[in-house]
Image (cartoon, helix red, strand yellow):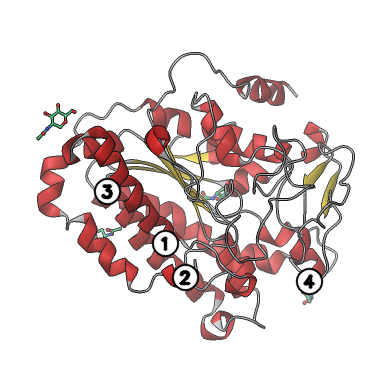
Amino acid sequence: MVFITILLLNLLPSFRGEPQVPCYFIFGDSLVDNGNNNGLMTQAKANYLPYGIDFPGGPTGRFTNGRNIADIIAELLGFDSYIPPFATATGSNIVKGVNYGSGAAGIRDETGIQLGGRISLNVQLLNHLVTIARITALLGNKTAANEYLTKCIYTVGMGNNDYINNYLMPQFYPTSREYTPDEFAQVLIDQYKQQLTTLYKLRARKIAIFGLGLIGCIPAELGMYGTNSSACVDTINNQVQLFNDRLKPLVDELNSNLTDAKFIYINTTSISSGDPSVIGITVVNAPCCIVSTTFAKGQCVPGSVPCRDRTKYVFYDNFHPVELVNLVMAGRSYNALLPSDAYPYDIRRLAQIVETNIGFDVDYKVNPEPDQDMGHEAEDGELDSQ
Ligand SMILES: *[C@@H]1O[C@H](CO)[C@@H](O)[C@H](O)[C@H]1NC(C)=O
Ligand SMILES: *[C@@H]1O[C@H](CO)[C@@H](O)[C@H](O)[C@H]1NC(C)=O
Ligand SMILES: *[C@@H]1O[C@H](CO)[C@@H](O)[C@H](O)[C@H]1NC(C)=O
Ligand SMILES: *[C@@H]1O[C@H](CO)[C@@H](O)[C@H](O)[C@H]1NC(C)=O
């Protein structure tokens, strides 16, 4: 109880003074999407009630009742407003950061396609190039922009949909016939490694990578696979663990190979383990809202009335946590409660690091021009479908 109290006290946002870093860029899926899917043709949207019922101003496209993980991390970093979605960010607003998150998106380009449009990680990186060009224009020259970009915090949380909306859907995707769980985890890691290296080449230096959650415990999978008297679908959690097990060594590899890179690993499993009743949560296996059984299956039925007490549930719909769980997730990734929450340290310490040698002149010689590199990535991107 004492720890929880301390945790929640630390979560009180401090809107006084300057943020701890000048900018925060967000790459990810529906756990961070704050409106990027609103204009897409897709079932993966949340710009209607009861989503946003506890958010100031109501529904925005966030897949929860209130704030999402990226919102809370932005508050903890001391920003005085939320980071704008790429889809609508304009003007000098983008200098403090942009949120590229997209529901149903994955490391793999095809992930989530059965739901419609989505912005895969490859396309999120292309969108970041657009932002960089705008920032360069705002700051006056490329050198100033490059130096600025090294000071920002970047969070990347990808891979959940490569399981939920790909590998675990054999009726839509061949991956589970093409790859064993072990092979699939490796294929994802290999592609992720390239994408994270691209982000580094675009001058990102302080990068927090979120591991995958306990996907075998979400109501959508409980309903589809049955639990065989366990609390979760253990086979799914074991498959996802194969990915997480490779993610931490990847962080070490990126840190040792890439000059001045500061990658950290957020252990979502560690943060979501433990007894949720300690913070008053009593329902762990059913959604708070009434979920659709047809169109946008597992998401809240538009206009339906959700559970009265949103702090008693883990899940808002069949996939996404309620705001209280987002508070814990963001709070412990920012300020680790257990040593296993963040490796080698948490986002708070990542923000405190003063760049000693950003080495942008040297980088120019040893790395390919970002633009050339991205031209390469674009070949298998999904620009058309967005
Ligand atoms: C780039 O802009 C910065 C800050 O605006 C300025 O100090 C610097 O002299 C400029 N460098 C070049 C090469 O124009
Ligand atoms: C259910 O659990 C039993 C005992 O652990 C195991 O033998 C069986 O294979 C499991 N069935 C499924 C469908 O997972
Ligand atoms: C790190 O360097 C080793 C040895 O050169 C190489 O095999 C590996 O692919 C590199 N990894 C990354 C992420 O660049
Ligand atoms: C994550 O934390 C759990 C403890 O909850 C630990 O068992 C696991 O090894 C950690 N995973 C990684 C990749 O560090």
**For the residues marked 4 and 3, what is the alpha-carbon distance in whole angstroms?**
41 Å
Question: Which one is in front, 198 or 22?
Answer: 22
Residue type marked 4: Met
Q: Which residue is mark 3?
A: 256
Are the residues at dot 3 and dot 2 in contact (C-beta closer than 8 Å)? Answer: no
Question: What is the x, y in percent for residue 267?
Answer: 55, 46
Disc 3 CB within 8 Å of nearest ligand 3 atom? yes
Density class for disc 2 (Cα within 10 Å; few <14, some 14-19, many ≥20) is some
Q: Which element type, helix, strand or loop, lies under badge 3?
A: helix
Are the residues at dot 2 and dot 1 in contact (C-beta closer than 8 Å)? Answer: yes
**Disc marking residue 224:** 4
Q: Which element type, helix, strand or loop, lies under badge 4?
A: helix
Task: Say which of marks 4 and 2 sits in front.
Answer: 2
**For the residues marked 3 and 2, what is the alpha-carbon distance in whole angstroms?**
28 Å
Give the residue drawn at x 83%, y 59%: 291
Q: Is residue 337 left or right of residue 4?
A: left
Question: What is the x, y in percent for residue 4?
Answer: 70, 26
Give the residue drawn at x 36%, y 58%: 126
- Above or below, 189 relative to 175: above
Q: Which residue is mark 2?
A: 109
Residue type marked 3: Ser
Residue type marked 2: Asp
Question: Taking the image as drawn, is residue 249 in sight?
Answer: yes
Q: How many marks?
A: 4
Q: Which residue is mark 1?
A: 123
Q: Is residue 311 left or right of residue 354?
A: right
Q: Earlier in the sequence, mark 3 or mark 2?
A: 2
Are the residues at dot 1 and dot 4 in contact (C-beta closer than 8 Å)? Answer: no
Q: Earlier in the sequence, mark 1 or mark 4?
A: 1
Residue type marked 1: Val
